[in-house]
């Protein structure tokens, strides 16, 4: 008997089945052979929220949650955050290898010349209410881009796919800035092709009447690093949405809009906003003991701690914590940082949290940095979407190339009524 198999005995029938093990997994479809009768559909695997189901094979991002490891295409996130740039990291995610100088220059140039959006998009944004949430605007305008580029439906053409990916990475900061300026009632600022990717976003967000906007280099670098840290994170909720919707072979703008919509949720892209609000509620370090008691009693949640994947310190959180102080040295310390530091110290020293392997995640400090940059909390998920764009596109491209992938169609366990006969409304009740 092969060692790379799993032997299962069905106690209902006494039959034994041998299932092959590949890459530490068993194919769910192999359970279908386990039946109690010939007309039985076969055994299914029940896994709400995909807590232990691998839906794809991927070579993009590696995570070891127990060891606190995150790598893009094999490169540790700490090295990329320290030495790379966001656009170089985007190239890595989408192409599998770090670029040569010529390749990177060509990629950056392609992104830079596609930052403008059609004037009709600006008019479309103008039609939203004055207080429309920026993420709602971004979800809608990303979807609307599919109507401006109808050739994007030809997803079988590699060159067409490449061009749409370039457009999405280039235009998402412009859409984000327009959404922000619309909310503020400010005139839109067009992209400046002489600035870096992060510098141009700052220009479109904050430029007023300057002849030329000069971004603060510390803020510019910090924003670029934050984008790197958010660029991909395996099969999370929004990436799953990108792959699932993309599996229908819809254009990439529509699939990306679905990913943005998933990110819009407070349990995903809105988590760092929840951290800031929690710290504001705590108020000061002296209130932390009482707050921790409320957490243990189940009255409130400790936001920014714990992760579905990580059972150790999130490696992104370590980078962001150092980054936070660089930003504070430049713009002044966020008054909430003392509360955050003391909350982290107390939680990491408390057996209650240690036993549950609750450590700070990427959201614990990122919101404080954005806030110190002068960015409103409702823009936090939009910034997340900018950073995650190359990861979504890399996952989408990988899904399309994977011959094992089909249109996503999970099974269900039906627990509803058996067959019932329709009755006219006059006979009901």
Image (cartoon, rainbow, N blue to C red):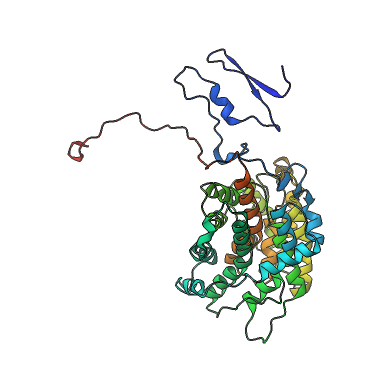
Q: Nearer the viewer, residue 207 or 121?
A: 121
**Which residue is situated farthest in the top direction here?**
14
The answer to whether one can see residue 370 in this image is: yes
Up-down relation of residue 117 to residue 254 (above or below)? below
Which image quadrant: the C terminus?
top left
Total number of numbered discs in the rendering: 0
**Which residue is situated farthest in the left direction here?**
426
Q: Nearer the viewer, residue 274 or 117?
A: 117
Up-down relation of residue 202 to residue 390 (above or below)? below
Which image quadrant: the N terminus?
top right
Quarter of the image for residue 324 reads bottom right
Quarter of the image for residue 45 reads top right
Quarter of the image for residue 259 reads bottom right
Up-down relation of residue 399 to residue 148 (above or below)? above
Q: Nearer the viewer, residue 390 or 362?
A: 390
In the shown orientation, is residue 237 left or right of residue 83?
left
**Which residue is pictured at 60% across the width and 47% down the height?**
400
Residue 254 position, x and y percent, is: 52, 57
The answer to whether one can see residue 281 in this image is: no
**Which residue is pictured at 53% across the width and 72% down the height?**
118
Residue 401 position, x and y percent, is: 62, 46
In the shown orientation, is residue 197 left or right of residue 79?
left
Residue 46 position, x and y percent, is: 54, 32
Residue 185 position, x and y percent, is: 52, 78
**Which residue is pictured at 57% across the width and 14% down the height?**
15
């Amino acid at each position: 008997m092969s060692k790379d198999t799993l032997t299962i005995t069905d106690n209902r029938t006494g039959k034994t089945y041998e299932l092959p093990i590949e890459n530490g997994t068993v194919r769910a479809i192999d359970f279908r052979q386990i039946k109690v009768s010939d007309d039985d559909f076969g055994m299914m695997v029940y896994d709400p929220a995909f807590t232990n189901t691998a839906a794809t094979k991927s070579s993009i991002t590696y995570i070891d949650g127990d060891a606190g490891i995150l790598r893009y295409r094999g490169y540790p996130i700490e090295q990329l955050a320290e030495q790379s740039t966001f656009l170089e990291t985007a190239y890595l995610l989408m192409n599998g290898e770090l670029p040569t100088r010529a390749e990177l220059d060509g990629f950056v140039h392609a992104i830079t010349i596609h930052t403008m959006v059609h004037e009709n998009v600006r008019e479309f944004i103008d039609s939203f209410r004055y207080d429309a949430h920026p993420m709602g605007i971004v979800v809608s305008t990303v979807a609307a881009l599919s109507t401006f580029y109808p050739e994007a439906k030809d997803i079988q053409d590699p060159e067409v796919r490449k061009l749409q990916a370039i457009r999405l990475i280039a235009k998402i900061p412009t859409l984000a800035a327009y959404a922000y300026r619309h909310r503020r009632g400010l005139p839109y600022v067009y992209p400046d092709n002489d600035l870096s990717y992060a510098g141009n976003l700052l220009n479109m967000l904050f430029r007023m009447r300057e002849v030329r906007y000069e971004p603060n280099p510390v803020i510019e670098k910090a924003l670029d690093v934050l984008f790197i840290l958010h660029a991909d994170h395996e099969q999370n909720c929004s990436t799953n949405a990108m792959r699932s919707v993309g599996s229908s072979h819809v254009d990439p703008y529509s699939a990306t809009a679905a990913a943005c919509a998933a990110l819009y949720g407070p349990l995903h892209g809105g988590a760092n906003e929840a951290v800031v609000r929690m710290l504001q509620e705590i108020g000061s370090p002296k209130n932390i003991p009482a707050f921790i008691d409320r957490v243990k009693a189940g009255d409130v949640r400790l936001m920014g701690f714990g992760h579905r994947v990580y059972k150790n310190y999130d490696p992104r959180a370590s980078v962001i914590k150092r980054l936070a102080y660089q930003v504070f040295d430049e713009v002044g310390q966020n008054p909430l940082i003392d509360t955050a530091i003391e909350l982290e110290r107390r939680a990491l020293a408390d057996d209650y949290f240690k036993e549950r392997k609750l450590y700070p995640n990427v959201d614990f400090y990122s919101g404080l940095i954005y806030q110190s940059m002068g960015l409103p909390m409702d823009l936090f998920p939009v910034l997340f979407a900018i950073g995650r764009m190359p990861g979504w596109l890399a996952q989408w491209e990988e899904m399309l190339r994977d011959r094992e992938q089909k249109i996503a169609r999970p099974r269900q366990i039906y627990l509803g009524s058996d067959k019932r006969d329709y009755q006219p409304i006059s006979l009901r009740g």
